[in-house]
Image (cartoon, rainbow, N blue to C red):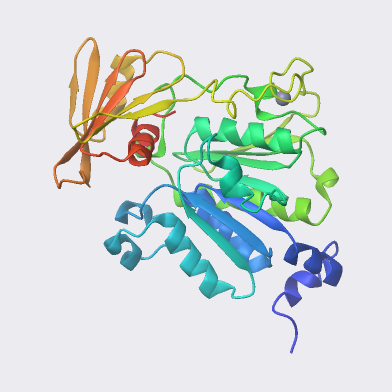
């Protein structure tokens, strides 16, 4: 009987040695939403020997339109995505090792989650996150440890992908030194997202990951790919010369997001089912935010704040979940006492 990887092994550039190399590799997929699901599915089927899966959220029925590892039963049970993904991938490939963490990746827990035995970093980091804060933290980790980071992002019908190879090209901060201001960007929860654009971006991410793990990273062209699948646009931006000596991260080796010098603070509010999320810096255009949120659910807009009631989701006490956002970007999330849920709601509806 041929190996289950036969169709992949006969490809030039893989072969039995390449397959053995994949089997001894470790990839970390951070964020198991639409991109993370599709990436993890590709890597598990391809026989990447160890996968670390990290996500802070629960499966919801509105995820099923595009998050390919989850079922209606997972959504009815409200299973954590990391656990639902682990179960599905274990059924897909029983020969690989899966480490699933139901957690919010932060500067404090990153090393413990990614290198639990302090022995070996993952060989590659895959960005399946829905927020810039975790993305910039991943960039710090990639540059600090000299590990490739495969970036991907989707919203509405548009997507972007690029592979960051520390030492060989620009990092995220060479291109975009600071994350965008909170509330300045559309999110999948406010602007929607089309399944097929996820498939394109995740396929590009998984393909680059396999090439890196097969030792062929130097053959990946230094490009940022952009797609708009609805408009039929695709564009390659050459980023080969974009590395900056004065980049705070890869030039000066200052890891602001790992040091906690940047990024948000989350504070449970004593005696209430409420959490305060304070972004590191920036200010919010409240009128623009109110207009975006009004397309999704009830909004109470005032000159100094916007209160938004999350439609179709309940708080831990069965009551309403709401976000009250102030001009400095700070938000009070009521209806939950869980910091990771508050951060997730902030990323989904305000954007961080
Ligand atoms: Zn850089």
Vertical arrangement, residue 179 with respect to residue 316, above or below: above
Outermost residue, left side: 319
In percent of width and height, residue 348 lies at 37, 36
Foreground pick, 156 / 169: 169
Name the side, left or right, on which 323 lies relative to 192. left
Q: Is residue 67 visible?
A: no
Q: Position of residue 319 (x, y in %)?
A: 13, 43
Q: Is residue 34 left or right of residue 1?
A: left
Q: Give coordinates of residue 152: x percent, y percent.
A: 59, 41
Q: Residue at x 61, y 61 (%)?
A: 42
Quarter of the image with the N terminus in it = bottom right
**In the figure, residue 38 lies in which quadrant?**
bottom right
Can residue 115 be seen? yes
Q: Nearer the viewer, residue 159 or 27?
A: 27
Residue displayed at 79% across by 40% down: 221
Image point 32% across, 65% down: which residue?
72
Residue at the bottom extreme, as displayed = 1
- 306 left or right of 204? left
Q: Is the residue 122 above or below the residue 6 in the image? A: above
């Amino acid at each position: 009987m041929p190996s289950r990887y036969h169709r992949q092994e006969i490809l030039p550039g893989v072969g039995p040695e390449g397959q053995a190399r994949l089997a001894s590799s470790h990839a970390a997929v951070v964020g198991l939403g639409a991109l993370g699901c599709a990436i993890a599915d590709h890597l598990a089927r391809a026989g990447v020997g160890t996968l670390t899966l990290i996500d802070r959220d629960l499966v919801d029925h509105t995820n099923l339109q595009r998050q390919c590892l989850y079922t209606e039963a997972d959504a009815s049970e409200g299973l954590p995505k990391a656990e639902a993904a682990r179960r599905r991938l274990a059924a897909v490939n029983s020969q690989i090792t899966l480490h699933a963490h139901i957690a919010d990746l932060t500067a404090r827990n990153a090393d413990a989650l990614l290198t639990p035995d302090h022995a070996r970093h993952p060989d590659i980091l895959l960005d399946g996150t829905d927020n810039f804060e975790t993305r910039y933290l991943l960039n710090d980790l990639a540059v600090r440890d000299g590990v490739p980071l495969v970036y991907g992002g989707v919203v509405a019908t548009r997507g972007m992908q690029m592979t960051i190879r520390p030492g060989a090209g620009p990092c995220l901060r060479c291109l975009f030194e600071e994350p965008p201001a909170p509330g300045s960007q559309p999110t999948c929860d406010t602007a929607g997202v089309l399944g097929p654009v996820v498939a394109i971006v995740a396929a590009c991410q998984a393909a680059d990951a396999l090439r890196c793990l097969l030792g062929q990273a130097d053959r990946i062209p230094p490009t940022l790919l952009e797609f708009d699948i609805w408009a039929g646009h695709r564009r390659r931006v050459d980023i080969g010369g974009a590395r900056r000596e004065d980049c705070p991260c890869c030039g000066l080796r200052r890891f602001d997001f790992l040091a906690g010098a940047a990024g948000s603070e989350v504070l449970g509010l004593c005696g209430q089912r409420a959490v305060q999320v304070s972004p590191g810096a920036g200010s919010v255009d409240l009128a623009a935010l109110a207009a975006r949120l009004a397309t999704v659910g009830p909004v109470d807009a005032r000159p100094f704040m916007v209160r938004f009631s999350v439609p179709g989701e309940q708080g831990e006490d069965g009551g309403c979940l709401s976000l009250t956002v102030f001009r400095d970007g700070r938000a009070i999330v009521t209806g939950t006492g869980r910091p990771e849920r508050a951060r997730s709601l902030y990323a989904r509806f305000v954007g961080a």
